[in-house]
Image: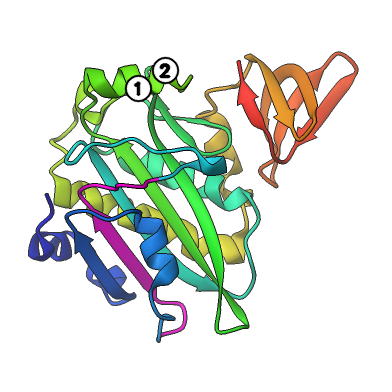
């Protein structure tokens, strides 16, 4: 699916110099798991990248499975060390960067469903998973995983529907600006993720807030937010500069930091 030489040629030379590890696999249990297990990155602040044509144990947020038969999705992870563990707003910042990158390939809008889903035409186009591990006892390895549907089979749709998941969309179902050749698409997504991983420790989520709210798929919708044993109902009203979901209730506005969201 990927050609190493073509992928390297599609990456900006300046970014390429910051990548100390780049792996391409036909199949892996999980690209995130692979980068969590590799030896400590020898160069401080450098990036590690892992791509796979198929994942046998891909996962999403809260332990959910990520279904992507071989050759039907873009599956990759990028990691970087950070002086401390990032907060949940990193996934939102990455969402904005990735959506912007995807829109260079399609003319349809790519929207964001809090906290980590990519949406197009009211269907799930992809998802982001951020995981962390201690590195060297003093730093945190931050791994950002991305799955984007390229093609969606009827079997996938049926399986996802049976699990109560959001109806999926494939990139090739959208109006094309230019052909999403796999190596060029992968390079664009690596670039987007790198931008988020490198800027978030310095700038936080603030610089991404407006971009998120312009793409907020939940905005104005009545939602149910289940956080632990508590459930809140209200109208989604965007996110604040910390990445919290704002829920407009009858008696005021509530900030939601972590929750399962249902319409």
- Residue 130 in percent (x, y) is at 51, 53
* Label 1 crowd bin: few (<14), some (14–19), many (20+), radius 10 Å: few
Q: Kindly identify the residue that appears in the image at 12 percent across and 43 percent down.
A: 181
Q: Kindly identify the residue that appears in the image at 62 percent across and 61 percent down.
A: 86
Which residue in the structure is indicated by mark 2?
162
Q: Kindly identify the residue that appears in the image at 77 percent across and 24 percent down.
A: 231
Which residue in the structure is indicated by mark 1?
159
**In the image, is residue 57 part of the stretch drawn in magenta?**
yes
Vertical placement of 202 versus 232: above or below? below
CA separation, marks 2 and 1?
A: 5 Å
Side of 211 relative to 19 (left or right): right
Q: Quadrant of residue 99?
A: top left
- Residue 102 in percent (x, y) is at 31, 39
Side of 125 relative to 86 (left or right): left
Residue at the right extreme?
251
Contact (Cβ within 8 Å) of mark 2 with mark 1: yes
Vertical placement of 59 versus 103: above or below? below
Nearer-the-camera pick, 137 or 229: 229
- Residue 108 in percent (x, y) is at 31, 23
Side of 250 relative to 115 (left or right): right
Question: For the residue labelled by badge 1, is the local secondary structure a helix, a strand or a loop?
Answer: helix
**In the image, is residue 45 part of the stretch drawn in magenta?**
yes
Which quarter of the rendering shows the C terminus? Answer: top right
Question: Range of the magenta residues?
Answer: 43-58
Question: For the residue labelled by badge 2, is the local secondary structure a helix, a strand or a loop?
Answer: helix
């Amino acid at each position: 699916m990927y050609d190493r030489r073509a992928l390297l040629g599609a990456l900006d030379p300046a970014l390429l110099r910051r990548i100390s590890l780049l792996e391409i696999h036909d199949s892996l249990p999980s690209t995130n798991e692979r980068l969590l297990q590799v030896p400590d990155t020898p160069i401080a602040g450098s990036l590690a990248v892992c791509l796979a044509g198929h994942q046998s144990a891909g996962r999403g947020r809260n332990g959910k499975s990520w279904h992507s038969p071989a050759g039907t999705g873009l599956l990759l992870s990028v990691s970087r060390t950070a002086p401390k563990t990032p907060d949940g707003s990193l996934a939102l910042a990455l969402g904005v960067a990735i959506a912007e990158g995807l829109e260079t390939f399609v003319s349809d809008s790519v929207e964001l469903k809090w906290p980590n889903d990519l949406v197009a035409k009211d269907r799930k186009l992809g998802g982001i998973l951020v995981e962390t591990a201690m590195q060297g006892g003093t730093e945190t390895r931050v791994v950002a995983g991305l799955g984007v549907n390229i093609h969606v089979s009827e079997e996938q749709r049926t399986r996802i529907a049976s699990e109560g998941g959001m109806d999926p969309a494939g990139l090739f179902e959208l109006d094309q600006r230019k052909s999403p050749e796999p190596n060029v698409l992968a390079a664009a997504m690596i670039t987007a993720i790198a931008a988020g991983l490198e800027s978030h420790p310095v700038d936080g989520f603030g610089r991404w807030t407006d971009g998120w709210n312009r793409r907020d798929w939940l905005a104005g919708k009545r939602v149910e937010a289940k956080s632990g044993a508590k459930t809140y109902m209200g109208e989604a009203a965007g996110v604040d500069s910390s990445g919290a979901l704002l829920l407009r209730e009858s008696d005021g506005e509530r900030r939601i930091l972590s929750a399962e969201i249902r319409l």
